[in-house]
Image (cartoon, rainbow, N blue to C red):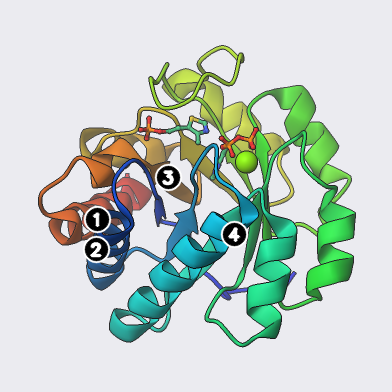
C-alpha cells in the first residue's frame, strides 16, 4: 500500500492498567518517538474499547500527531471512530478475526491494516494479501506471559527467513525488551512491538527513545 505512511520501528501495544495509566503510557511513548500505538485489551467489550481507544487516540495526537493509532481486533469500533473523525488509523487483525479483505473494504485504501503471523506458513499466506495488507506481526520472539499464541518461539535466527519470505514489513513481538532491539533490527524486521516493556516502565518516553536509537544502530550492523 502507500509507502512511508507509518514508522514501525518502535511499536507500542497497550497492556494492563487503568484507562488513565494506559493513556499516559501510550502518549509518553509517542512523545518518545513511538511510530505506532496499538490499543489492545482482552477481553474487552466494543463499548469499552471505543472509550479506551478514543482517549488514547486523542492524547497521542496531542503530543505526537505523526504517531499512528491502531485498534486490535475490533474492526467495527475502529471503522466507527474513524468515520467520526477520531485520530485512529486502522486495525491489527488476528488469524481468527474478520478477514483483511473485509477490513480493507470497510476502512478504505488509506487505513493501516496489520495481521498476526508467526510461522513461514502464515507469512506465505499473508503474502497472498500483500495488495491489501500493510504489515504483519510475527511472534512470539520468545515465550511471554502476556500472550500464549500456541506457536513456538521464533528466536533471533527465525526472523531472517521470515523477512526474506514476506512481501510486507514485519514487526517482531513477544517478550521483546530494549536490550533485544539492536539484534532484532539487524535481522531486517521493520520494527519491534512491546507490551510490558512500556506498561511496566516508569518512563515510557525514555523506553521509546532508547528503542528508536537502538533500532537505528541495528540497521547499521
Ligand atoms: C503487532 C502485533 N502482533 C501480534 C499481535 C497478536 O495479538 P492478539 O491480538 O492477542 O492475538 P490475535 O488476535 O492476533 O490472535 C498483536 N496484537 N499485535
Ligand atoms: C500480543 C502478542 N502477540 C504475540 S506475543 C504478544 C504479547 C507481547 O507482550 P510482551 O511484550 O509483554 O511480551
Ligand atoms: Mg488480535
Asked if residue 153 can be seen in this view, the reply is: yes
The local secondary structure at tag 4 comes to helix
The local secondary structure at tag 1 comes to helix
* Pointer 3 with pointer 1, Cβ within 8 A: no
Between marks 1 and 4 in the image, the one whose residue lies nearer the viewer:
4
Q: Which residue is mark 4?
A: 47
Q: CB at mark 4 closer than 8 A to ligand 3?
A: no
Q: On the image, which quarter does residue 183 sit in?
A: top left
Between marks 3 and 4 in the image, the one whose residue lies nearer the viewer:
4
Q: On the image, which quarter does residue 2 sit in?
A: bottom right
* Pointer 3 with pointer 4, Cβ within 8 A: no
Q: Position of residue 210 (x, y in %)?
A: 18, 53
Which dot marks residue 21? 1
Which dot marks residue 193? 3
Q: CA distance from mark 4 to mark 2?
A: 20 Å
Mark 2 or mark 4, which is nearer the start of the sequence? 2
Q: CA distance from mark 1 to mark 4?
A: 19 Å
Amino acid at each position: 500500500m502507500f509507502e512511508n505512511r507509518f514508522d514501525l520501528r518502535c511499536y507500542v501495544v497497550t497492556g494492563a492498567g487503568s484507562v488513565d495509566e494506559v493513556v499516559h503510557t501510550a502518549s509518553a511513548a509517542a512523545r518518545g518517538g513511538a511510530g505506532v500505538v496499538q490499543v489492545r485489551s482482552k477481553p474487552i467489550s466494543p463499548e469499552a474499547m471505543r472509550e479506551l481507544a478514543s482517549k488514547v487516540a486523542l492524547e497521542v495526537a496531542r503530543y505526537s500527531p505523526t504517531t499512528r493509532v491502531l485498534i486490535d481486533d475490533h474492526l467495527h469500533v475502529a471503522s466507527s471512530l474513524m468515520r467520526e473523525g477520531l485520530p485512529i488509523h486502522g486495525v491489527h487483525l488476528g488469524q481468527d478475526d474478520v478477514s483483511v479483505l473485509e477490513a480493507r473494504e470497510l476502512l478504505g485504501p488509506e487505513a493501516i491494516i496489520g495481521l498476526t503471523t508467526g510461522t513461514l506458513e502464515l507469512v506465505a499466506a499473508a503474502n497472498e494479501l500483500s495488495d491489501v495488507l500493510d504489515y504483519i506481526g510475527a511472534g512470539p520472539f520468545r515465550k511471554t506471559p502476556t500472550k500464549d499464541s500456541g506457536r513456538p518461539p521464533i528466536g533471533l535466527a527465525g526472523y531472517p527467513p521470515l523477512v526474506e519470505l514476506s512481501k510486507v514489513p514485519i514487526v517482531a513481538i513477544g517478550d521483546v525488551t530494549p536490550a533485544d532491539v539492536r539484534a532484532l533490527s539487524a535481522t531486517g524486521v521493520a520494527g519491534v512491538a512491546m507490551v510490558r516493556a512500556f506498561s511496566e516502565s516508569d518512563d515510557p518516553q525514555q523506553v521509546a527513545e532508547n528503542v528508536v536509537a537502538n533500532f537505528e544502530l541495528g540497521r547499521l550492523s
